[in-house]
Amino acid sequence: MEFDVKKEKERVISWIREFFLKNGPDCNAVLGISGGKDSSVAAALCVQALGKDRVIGVLMPNGVQSDIDMSLLLVKHLGIRYYVVNIKDGYDGLVEAIKESGLENLSNQSTINLAPRIRMSTVYAISQSCNGRVCNTCNLSEDWIGYSTRYGDSVGDFSPLSHYTVQEVKALGRELGLPEILVEKAPSDGLCGKTDEDNLGFSYMMLDKYIREGIIDNEDKKKLIDHKHRINKFKLELMPACENDLTIKADD
């Protein structure tokens, strides 16, 4: 089925409006702004749905961020309020405190994931202080293979893009009139100095075609994608809870 970008744009905008009618008619949409396509498109959709005065961006460099000009380009293009919070002191302080606790080895993956978790805490702190609801910016392609940090960029109060692939998010960005440099900026986690595709071992174009059409011409890549999807599915599910036979009589 061909992707009808105009129809999908209106679908998401209507969905965001409906979410806020039910979950805070006077609330603001608050989201982290990385300067990449996902946060750019999510922010633009929120502006279309709510108006620019009800969208707040949070820029969170960890020390010096070489591409923060892309984040600034986005917030100025949309005309939204924004805050810049440098997380370096908090990040460094927490890493040092963990090491001083006696833990002999803070793993490399732990230090990589710590930054997005601090960023999400920061977004929630600002949101709670600004009558906000946090917008998750993950897309279907990333979620499919678990390319997000649990309790970091994987969370939020509402998620407008989680059922759209990377190619579809790009199409939405163009339909929304975003600067092409934001739409086509090479996706990177901003943590280890590599692009997403360098880390993953396959392109988003290949992944998106496989997701939507079930077609992939490289068996090794298919096995890799299937493996990543299988071991990361738990990130998309509610936390397991032990069930019991006890009754609940309160109104639900």
Image (cartoon, rainbow, N blue to C red):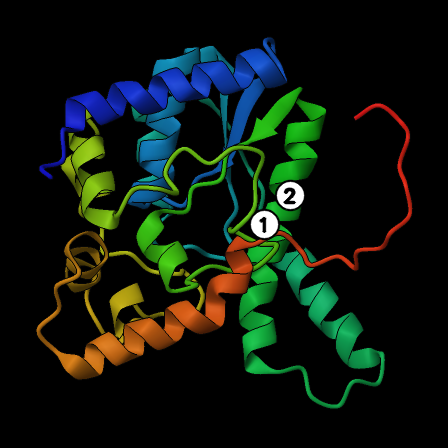
Q: Which of the pair 172/78 is nearer the observer?
A: 172
Of residues 120 and 22, which is closer to you in this image? Answer: 22
Rounded to the nearest whole Å, what is the CA distance between mark 2 and mark 1? 5 Å
Q: Is residue 247 left or right of residue 165?
A: right
- Secondary structure found at label 1: helix
Find residue 122 and name its label.
2
Left or right side of 252 for 119:
left
Relative to 94, say whether 77 is above or below.
above
Q: Residue 208 carries which label?
A: none
Question: Can you give x and y, in whole percent of width and height, for residue 50 in the image?
Answer: 44, 12
Residue contact at pointers 2 and 1, CB within 8 angstroms: yes
Quadrant position of residue 74: top left
Q: In which quarter of the image is the N terminus?
A: top left
- Is residue 89 visible in the rendered structure shown here? yes
Please name the amino acid that badge 2 sits on: Thr
Residue 113 position within the rendered picture, expressed as x and y whole percent measured from the top left: 56, 66
Q: Could you tell me the amino acid type at mark 1?
A: Arg
Report the residue marked by disc 1.
119
Quadrant location of the C terminus? top right
Residue 39 locus on image (x, y percent): 38, 39
Mark 2 surroundings: few (<14), some (14-19) or many (≥20) residues within 10 A: some
Q: Residue at x 61, y 54 (%)?
A: 151
Give the quadrant of residue 192: bottom left
**Residue at left 17%, top 22%?**
6
Disc 2 on helix, strand or loop?
Answer: helix
Reply above or below: 226 against 175: below
Please give left or right for residue 230 compared with residue 184 in the image: right
Q: Which residue is drawn at 40% across and 61% down?
A: 189
Image-based side of 50 in relation to 221, left or right = right
